[in-house]
Amino acid sequence: MSQGAPRERLNVVSKELFLSLYLPATAISLGTGLALPVLPVYAKSFDVSFEVAALVVILHHVGSLVATIPVGYSLERMGRRPILLSGGVLVALSAFLTALAPTFVALLACRFVNGVADQMWQMSRLAMITDTGKARERGRMITWMMELSRFGNLFSPALGGFMAVFWDIRVPFVFHGILVLIAILPSFLIARETDPNRARARAEGRERERVPWREVIGGLRQPQMLAFLGAQFMANFTRGVSRGGFLNLYAAYQYGVGPATLGLLASANSFLGLPLGFATGYIMDRWGRKRTIVPGFSLLAVAMVFMTSTAFFQLPFEVYAIAFLCVSFAGGITGGNMQVMGSDLAPSRGRGQWMAIWRFIAESGSQLSPSTFALVSALFGYVGSFSIVGFSSLAVALLVGLGIRETVGRQRAGEEEVGEVVPAATGPPSERGDAVGSTR
């Protein structure tokens, strides 16, 4: 395809996107949900202590973190399609091997590999959306993918528990692998390489240019990029507390509530977040990314002040439940919007390497959050830990609101995007903008 050829575009509700993006996202989350309630019992069956058993959760997150740099580099060197397909297959394979783990050490190895595979799939899909999606479509593509993942977790944990009780504790892991394999099969047929520089080099009959790391890192030093990376770290730090289950842990210890009540709160959280996630994708594509990021994280900061007051004044559980739902509401507004902004800012040159650094910083925030929350709680109580989360939420709103320009144009939706913010390290003007190629 020549450089001046028309660019193929994805439609946010196309069959290709359903088969290559939404279906795999739902299947992977369904499989993860099936295994989630069984994993602690499975780890306990190896006769290890609670502290040792916790490694099955920790090593999955460690695998996801350490994979960011090599996966991003591989996206640049090998292309998006090989990482996408191998990531999906590796998710399924690690699930099968988990069911067959003969020792606890083998189980830990499988969990680590599963974390790596999850990161491969997530980063490759994000790169392909960045390559091929219109600026006015990427918001819905990314947030809808995330919300379908949330939908997959609504009922699958209960189903996984029933499978373990009526069949065998290893059965949910087998179903996890089968679901992922079935969902990833269409991608082998319809997924195409989307790297803009690779496609351009192939069309011109030349070898693909390699972008040095120093060029990518140099682009990240610009003030707007530094503000974005700082905001991304703080955003993941904020969300890491709720994703890590610390709010449920707090409710269990502070108010003595049981699993039934915690389950109702979790269900309310999911049902509240789903419609908000689909709505924010539309808002970001129609009116801009900052229209959800700044209000969403500002509201989350206010909700965390409310949450802090329940700890400070030792308010009853009914008030805490209201505060929890307020946090859930604000979290539903903020889900996925930083990924959308990062997709807008990603340069066309060295995009995989840029994403490696970006996602490493994001994952670092997620991993640091639970341990910081626990440490501050031990030293200063829950008032201190909730306050830190509220401060980080406010920091995201300020950094994005004051330090980053809107990353989509201001013209009416449906028009071809012009005048977008051009990120650093994008190369000559002829290489800026959306990628050549499609996943169709």
Image (tube, helix red, strand yellow):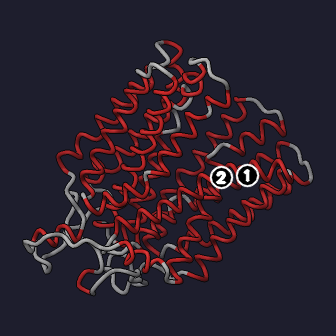
Quarter location, residue 200: bottom left
- Which numbered disc flags the more N-terminal residue, 2 or 1? 2
Secondary structure of residue under mark 2 = helix
User: How many labels, in total?
Assistant: 2
The numbered disc on residue 280 is none
Q: Measuring 48% from the left and 21% from the top, which residue is drawn there? A: 103
Q: Residue 61's x, y, as percent?
A: 53, 45
Q: Mark 1 and mark 2 in contact (Cβ < 8 Å)?
A: no
Disc 1 residue type (three-letter): Phe
- Callout 1: 10 Å neighbours few (<14), some, many (20+)? many
* Residue at disc 1, secondary structure: helix
Q: Position of residue 75 (x, y in %)?
A: 31, 59
Screen quadrant of the C terminus: bottom left
Residue drawn at x 22%, y 43% is 186
Residue shown at the point (65%, 58%) measured from the top left: 238
The N terminus appears in which quarter of the rendering? bottom left
Looking at the image, which residue sits at the far left? Answer: 205
* Residue, disc 1: 373
Q: Which residue is mark 2?
A: 328
What amino acid is at disc 2?
Ser
Establish if 28 lies above or below 298. Answer: above
Task: Tell which residue pokes out farthest to the right in this image.
Answer: 313
Residue at image point 58% right, 40% down: 58
| Rendered position, 404 above or below 14 | below
Q: Position of residue 316 (x, y in %)?
A: 88, 44
